[in-house]
Image (cartoon, helix red, strand yellow):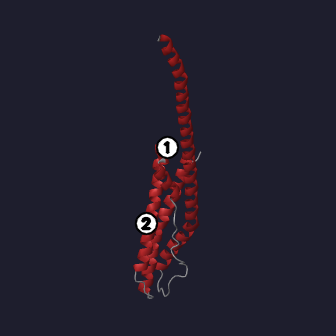
């Protein structure tokens, strides 16, 4: 009987070692896969932020010109015509698909807490920027601009105020983009 128990134990030990090694290898493989996916998410967020930064960089100069020109023309006497410098609000759409994917997959939780906070802050600012741009367009559509001096001044005033806020938001986004990229780029 003792001999049979010894034989059984000798047969169980290699099986147990094999199962244990199987778990170790599986766990190691899963850890590597998660780390790889997290790094891919990080790279996608970096690319998305750089793309959004580039989009803002393309319109920031135009919005600054609209703000400054509107301020100037609003205060000149005898305004007789609508501005020729205004070519629309040129609002842009900023993307957030990499961030959304990170949230949906849960991979964002594998980043450092400080990185998550910085990323979330930037995407929250982008959302506020998007909402403000919608508000500007809505206001532009609903304001009754008439082709007289009062209507033209009203138009210049609206552009001056709204573009001031847009330029402030765009500059803030640019600063936060730079801080975020500095923090998450390796």
Q: Which mark is residue 110?
A: 1
- In which quarter of the view is residue 18 placed? top right
Residue visible at 54% across and 72% down in the picture: 65
Q: Which mark is residue 131?
A: 2
Determine whether the residue tagged by mark 1 lies in a helix, strand or loop. helix
Q: Position of residue 53 (x, y in %)?
A: 56, 60
- Observer-nearest residue: 32 or 166? 32
Determine whether the residue tagged by mark 2 lies in a helix, strand or loop. helix
Question: 139 above or below 1?
Answer: below
Residue visible at 53% across and 25% down in the picture: 15
Q: Position of residue 32 (x, y in %)?
A: 57, 39
Outermost residue, top side: 2
In primary-sequence order, the first of circles 2 and 1 is 1
Does residue 161 appear in the picture of this structure?
no
Question: Callout 2: few (<14), some (14-19), or many (20+) C-alpha neighbours within 10 Å?
Answer: few
Q: Quadrant of the C terminus?
A: top right
Does residue 62 appear in the picture of this structure?
yes
Question: 113 above or below 62?
Answer: above
Question: Callout 1: few (<14), some (14-19), or many (20+) C-alpha neighbours within 10 Å?
Answer: some
Q: Nearer the viewer, mark 2 or mark 1?
A: 1
Residue visible at 53% across and 70% down in the picture: 63
């Amino acid at each position: 009987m003792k001999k049979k128990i010894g034989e059984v134990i000798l047969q169980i030990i290699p099986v147990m070692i094999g199962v244990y090694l199987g778990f170790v290898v599986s766990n190691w493989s899963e850890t590597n896969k998660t780390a790889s996916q997290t790094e891919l998410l990080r790279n996608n967020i970096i690319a998305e932020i750089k793309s959004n930064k580039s989009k803002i960089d393309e319109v920031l100069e135009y919005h600054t010109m609209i703000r400054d020109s509107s301020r100037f023309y609003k205060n000149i006497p005898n305004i007789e015509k609508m501005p020729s410098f205004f070519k629309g609000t040129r609002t842009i759409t900023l993307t957030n698909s990499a961030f959304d994917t990170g949230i949906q997959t849960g991979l964002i939780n594998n980043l450092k807490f400080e990185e998550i906070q910085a990323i979330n802050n930037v995407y929250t600012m982008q959302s506020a920027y998007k909402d403000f741009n919608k508000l500007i367009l809505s206001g532009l559509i609903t304001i009754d601009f008439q082709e007289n001096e009062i209507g033209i001044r009203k138009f210049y005033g609206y552009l001056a105020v709204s573009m001031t806020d847009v330029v402030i938001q765009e500059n803030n986004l640019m600063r936060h983009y730079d801080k975020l990229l500095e923090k998450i780029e390796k």
